[in-house]
Image (cartoon, rainbow, N blue to C red):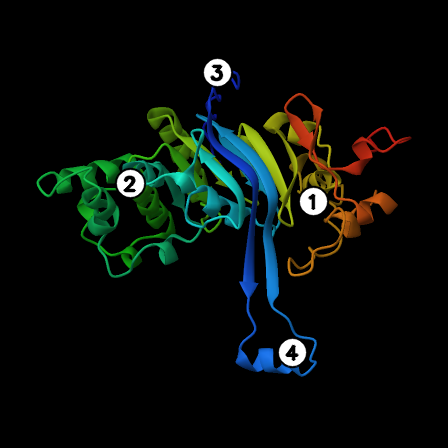
Amino acid sequence: MSISLDKAPEAPPASTAAPMIEVQGVSRRFAKRLDFAGKLLAKLGAPLRDEVVHAVDKVDLTIRKGEVVGLVGESGCGKSTLGRMIAGILPPSDGTILWKGRDRQGLSGKEARAAMLQAQMIFQDPMSSLNPRLKVAEIVGEAPLFHGLTNRGQFATYVDDQLRRAGLDPTLKARYPHQFSGGQRQRIGIARALAVQPEFLVCDESVAALDVSIQAQILNLFMRLRKELDLTYLFISHDLGVVEHLSDRVVIMYLGRVVEEAPTETVFGRPNHPYTRSLLASVPKIEARKKAFAVVRGEIPSPLAPPSGCHFHPRCPHAFDRCKVEIPALKEVAPGHRSRCHLNDEPGRAGLPA
């Protein structure tokens, strides 16, 4: 069976597109506090302490209107947590997130509500993100009715329009989520997000749980909606093929930090960071049938105790002494291309080996 993906529309020129999202030094930590027994044991000398997960560590990121930014990394690297902060679901522990140039945490009243509605999230598992007790009409229409985007008299027509836009038959709106297939449930999630008329969508592994043929349909839907509604996307995925096809720019995360950021063709054609190269080398290719593909060696360290210096140094084939003690800066290595690697500025080393 042949799976066809539509060609992604081109992003607007960076020079004319104003930033929609600006992430400045954002971090997010999750703390697991000791219970009463743990505190008592700690006072008695047991080596116990609060556990802190460093999910996101001082991330800087800009997303311009009309862009599709792909966010890639292994499970546990913090990409979903970053997506939730950008969507306004989680507050950052440190740093600032600007929405159209204004600190979103400083907004109040109508401005805060508008910013909340204009950034929506589509989740990986549509079954767990849809209320099983509500019918589809309620799932899709509840938020726009509450926020005054429609009224009781226009409710049915409004919901029908949202379902059609997402490729669903409006006659099914009286059904419950469990009565739909996985692809249909994902379309319900898309219809729910679009029903509040957003400008920006965070898609968190939105096709990962779907069959390949259904993935293609949903990806084509995303691209069509981008063109029709002038949407901006942060597309979180571990599937490099999907990201390459859909994104204008790619951001690579490793253990809470951005390690590389560049236009899509640069990341896939001229990757700079050793982690990015390892990720691309681990993808099997049809044209290289006789070549054994390599996996990223070792396991991703625990975010409870991340390595010192460069987080990737225990798994990096090019690591040297400096990598173990000094955090590399995210520097521009070419126009529009940033990378976090000491090999780019180490004296006597001309960047990464070819």
Which of the marked residues, 3 or 1, is nearer the chain's N terminus?
3
Secondary structure state at the residue bearing disc 3:
loop
Residue 238: percent from left, percent from top? 57, 45
- Image vertical order of residue 51 relative to residue 237, above or below: below
Which of the marked residues, 4 or 3, is nearer the chain's N terminus?
3
Q: CA distance from mark 3 to mark 1?
A: 37 Å
Which three-letter amino acid code belongs to the residue tagged 4? Ala
Residue 29: percent from left, percent from top? 56, 55
The crowd level at tag 4 (other Cα within 10 Å; few <14, some 14-19, many 20+) is some
Residue 224, labelled with which disc?
A: none
Q: Do we see residue 170 in this rendering?
A: yes
Which three-letter amino acid code belongs to the residue tagged 2? Gly
> Left or right: where does residue 345 sit relative to residue 153?
right
Q: CA distance from mark 4 to mark 3?
A: 57 Å
Q: Which residue is mark 2?
A: 109
Residue 201: percent from left, percent from top? 41, 37
Residue 42, labelled with which disc?
A: 4
Who's the residue at 56% across and 82% down the image?
37
